[in-house]
Amino acid sequence: MNTGYQIVVCGGIVPDPLQTLEPVPTPTGPALKNELVLPATLDPWACHALYEAAHLARQHPGSKVVLVSISPKQRLQQVMMTIAQKVPFDLVALDGAASGFTDPAETAAALAEAINGLPGLNREKLLVFGGWESASRGAGVTLQYLAERLAISDVFMGVDELRVQADGSLEVLERIEGGRQQASRCSGPPVVVGWATGKLPEPRNNPQIGMQNMRAIIPVLQRAKQVKIGAEGVSFASVALPKQLRQTRIVRDATPEAIAREIVEWIKG
Amino acid sequence: MEPNIDKPSEATLRAVPGDDVRQIMWRFSDRYDLQLLVQSARTVARGPVARLVAGGGRNTHDWTPEKAALLQVFDDSGITAAFLDPEHGGHISGPKNLALALIAFELSWVDAGAATCSLAGNLGLAPIHERGTPEQRAEYLGRAAPGSSAVSGKPQVRAAFALTEPLPFVGVETGMLSGKVRVAEWPDGGEPILHVDKRGRFITNMAFANVVTAAVASDDLRIKGTCMVILEEGDEGVFDRGVATKKLVHQLSSTCDPVFSMRVPASRIVGGYTVKDGVIVPNFSHSEIIESVFRRTRVTVGLMTSAKLLSAIEPVILYQRRRFRGGDVAPGMPRYELGLQQKEDSLHRLVDIWATGEASASLGFAAARLFDELDPIEREKDHLFAERGLSGRAAFRELTKAQTEAIELVRLRSLPLDAQDKKRMAELESNLLVRFVMLDSLANVLCPACKLWNTGHGANMMREAVSLMGGYGVTEDCPGFLGQKWMDAQLEATYEGPEAVQRLQLSVTMTNELFLAQFEQWMAEMRRIASERPGMGACVLATAMDLWLWTLKHVQSATDAHGAKLFHKTRQGVTFALADALCWILAVRQFILDVLELETKGKENPALTDALPGLVAFFGDLAHVQAARAAGEVGRITSEIVHGYRAHGMQPDISQLCGCKSRDRDAIAGAGQQSVNSETPDSGVKGRGRAGALPELGELTPFAEMRVKLDLCLSGTRLSKDRAAQALTTVMVPEALDYPV
Amino acid sequence: MESILFLGTCEEDGSLGKPARETLGVASQLAAQLRAPFAVGLIGTSVQEAANQAADSGATRFLGVCGPDFSQPRYATDSAAAEALCRAANATIILAPGTSRLMRCLPGVAHRLNGRADTHVTAFVANEGTITAQRWYYRQRMEARFTRSHRPWFVLIDPGAAPVWSGISRQVEVENIDVVLPDSARKTEVTGFREPEAGLNTIRPDADLLFVVGAGWTKKQPDGKVHAAEAEQLILEFLTRTRCSLGSSKSLVDLGSEGQPVLSFLSHLNQIGQTGSTPRHPKGLATCCHGEEPHTIGWRFISERRAINLDPQCGWARGKADVLYVADAFAVLKRINELLSET
């Protein structure tokens, strides 16, 4: 019996976190300055979701991982040069905006259409993964919209761990307030899982996997369908960088004793 | 008439160029295998390698467990296997020069010692890869693949290349070997057993290598000439790794002075041997092997320095802009926002560094691509010669014939389209040997030029980069490890053949008639570019090329004040200097071509649409700056050679002009003044009519005209520099380097 | 005309938690400004006490979905309850605290009602009839104000972003809304709650002080050796003495997965910054951490910031901290611990 899962991971691209980010107004709403030329990465939470998906797929033979991404396809292609070396997956690429200023409802609609269009989709085996947040919009709502569109009523957010039990049920640990975790047991798929950082380290680059993935990914990127993702109904009044620079007092040449006293006083004050 | 002003584009550089830009410029946008490899190497460089450097891992010349751990990282990330063909466990098909060049570039962005550590293993295997027998290739290349030991049951091969020997042969004299090979035993009808004695010096990877390809000379009448022999740890005899070299550079690679005294079967002679009249005749001498090895690996060394220069841009900009922050300045104040970038000098110097880095990377990657093109053709040629039984003089004759035909092809190509003999051209173009000699003549120039100029001049420019960081530059804390990179660049100038060796090779190969025929084609190409795309240096470069070629031809027949020939292999003041001048030309020429490639192909990438005009404008300005600098060097060098070997008083006599023979101070001043007042360059050159103007220059007249033209062609170069400098004040850079400091 | 619903969940003891009272204040103020109908909707085992707590908020209706099925935070049941409350209240604007429970379910409810949800909202105000939300984008690197035409508009206010509302508690009448759950809503069962694995409750959202450790703790010290064990001991002692919350930089957490020396009690849960959390604390002390932007964006909501670093040019020096002590953190922390033990 094939115990494998169909794991669909949703993830867009975001600017490399080290880049300078500056908002600029455009006729279609705010955008990032030089957005299209900034080096990008797969959203870090989506990355964790992808690694967890691949890990789960390895444990359950017959599983398949599909990454569905809405991103400008040329940028996505560059990102794939790194991600495709990490774990094996199929790509479904939708050529559309990955900006933080788009509306997640529109993203979810396009994702749902793409997922519903996957050949051989079997809800009894379907696990929809994604990040519980993102480094762009950071709202943590897309997956719930998506769950509703896919009529999936078991949704977990901020997930650190997902374990398949012997009876096929899923045990899920979600992050909640106070550094605690909520444990749940779900009888089985379909589920939607918004991953926190998970527990797995970043897999090492494996060029063999990369070559294998890219053979399929390049044609997929070339025929990526264009989707229009905007923010209908949203009107931005302002987008600004915070002016939070402080007047830093730099204390040099003080003894550890003096510094320690000052800090203790400050902590207690 | 409206003056021909190179109208500056309003578009300017927005952000530091990303991977998609580099893939176009360095021509691997359709090679996702290489793009994957770049990301892999970058992850290693900016992760484990950078952390090791930041943690002080380079502060010892000993081979430490931390350094050794990098070998596993290279294995895991595919860097080790990138050298290998798929049948030996590799993952890249076809020639791998560009692949290895990209690895070297990425690793050297952080630390070139790590690059050396990775590449020296390839160097050790390269004799086997290039000239090894099928059995040797299967055994040693197959065992070099990570994970292969599980199959072979033997340790994974980590190779070292042992050529350099202790004094007196250390250095340039690679033709002389004190390492010896003798027949130790030769059983009747059996395979001879050899005894190899070799002392190595500065042998990279020696602290951990278990296979060594050693260059040795025969010390036995029963062995002919020289060869390379494969030594393996565990073979009978002494395999002494020796003491660590107390080097100051490339500390993440291991370097030792090993001693070998071992018995190995004759089947270990790289490329095999035949027995003729009771004498073992190696199929390849050591020099034949190292020639084919070095001409490839030297390019990657050249790119190590290019990476350093380009890696310096971001840390320097960050340092310059933030120089005064934290002090008595507030956001919005120029001193806060721009810091040292308020000063033109800081910007201009950084423009020079960036331009040099671009030109050297362009040259290096072009050379690597050329070898990728040449490799399969060379193998076909070898196969053809073997099939026809051509070797020695017979092979030479075939190649000489092909050379003549290749020159014919070049000439045909330079004719106007309607005057070209298409049939003949097609015939020549389909000729394997013609294609081979054409590429070979270029490779013979581009390889030493890249190695020489990228590293030598690159080291000088790294010093500039360090100086731009102030005192910070020479500390361990300098972001981007610029101080270490400066030192490392000096090694790169020496490693795998020091500068003198490269100059020597160039001084021969640059006079190849086939190369020069192609060079003339390039001059025409630059003229065409100059007319179509003014303002990026093609004009001044074309003139510099004219000047260089004229000078080369001139010195080949001219004599000095004492009647001695100017162009002679012992007259390195001429030959080496002209080789240096050529390098400047080649580098910026390739940079200009790469900018044009970006302009053309960049349009196909919608993600670049907005940024492309600015990128092209900025790179065009950098190319212009670099072309001006190259032209200056060419002008200086050629002038010194053309005039410097003449004596005052020789015809044409110019002493009246410079006034240096006059005892009258006023006359000296007057002479200088008159030359300043000369109205037109034309009248000045020909010296007609006015006292104090240039004298009749006779055969030197074309040279003097070209010199004046060269000066005039510099129009706009400083405007380009100003624009490029301005771009540096606005270009968006990351908040921080993407590797630890 | 807008109609406002405050939507909250009850704590285990039946009361309204702090984040809920913060958001109740925002809702109450907005309703007053707009003179809009204002209802309170509550979910929990029992909602009466929480409703009583909100009696003084200006709400005119108190709605509840209660029962054992609604005690546990679970998407299917919470979304069904919230949907029923929203439909009953017929609200155009639903304000809710950004707790993990409501963040999980309300976006789905927004979809069901053809509305939209905005989370991590830090301010929500009406100005001359225009209602504007404020939130951060790109991991707290830029802040935007915006309006939405979609209704209903679900707005989840970030905990800590608004003052805690308090009013006199008195008995109110709660309209109980019946929710019939399909069997599929019970496919998931909450089985319990876990403390962080380290055994130390080192993440304390309510602590006054955030203590951040960077990769420098695991680097070679002046004697050329790594002192990870000593670092662990110093840090743990400091945590014990101050009861502060422990954060770390990404580079330090990442080292663990690459076989580098690490501090054993750190995990991704502790990570502050670009891919970590952005906690709210009155004070923050960074040690052995460079203070570059990707990390310090996680400090956006730390009011007073001090740092100890050997590098006077580090990010903290460039306006990211109030005070930078250029010193050896080992020596300073050792002395701090001694001083703390004396008092």
Image (tube, coloured by chain):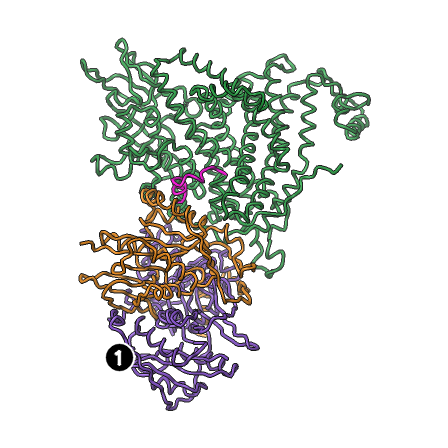
Residue C269: x and y in percent read 34, 63
The answer to whether residue B393 is seen in the rendering is yes
Q: Which chain is orange?
A: A
Quarter-of-image position of residue C339: bottom left
Relative vertical location of residue B399 with respect to residue A140 in this rendering, above or below: above
Q: Could you say where residue B311 lies in the image, as x and y percent from the top left?
A: 49, 44
What's the magenta bit mostly, secondary-structure-wise? helix
Q: Position of residue A190 (x, y in %)?
A: 28, 62
Residue closer to the observer: C42 or B699: C42
| Structural crowding at the residue carrying mark 1, measured as other residues with C-alpha within 10 Å and reported as few (<14), some (14–19) or many (≥20) | few
Residue at 39% of width from left, 57% of height from top? C250
Nearest the camera: A41 or B426? B426
| Residue ranking furthest to the bottom | C171
Asked whether residue B33 is drawn in magenta, I would say yes
Q: Quadrant of the C terminus of chain C?
A: bottom left
Image hue for chain B: green
Which chain is displayed in purple in the rendered image? C
Q: State the residue at coordinates (68%, 36%).
A: B715
Residue annotated with mark 1: C68
Residue B522: within the magenta? no
Quarter assignment of residue B691? top right
The amino acid type of the residue labelled 1 equals Pro
Q: Bounds of the magenta span?
A: B25-39
Q: Quadrant of residue C80?
A: bottom left
Q: Horizontal placement of B1 versus C84: left or right?
A: right
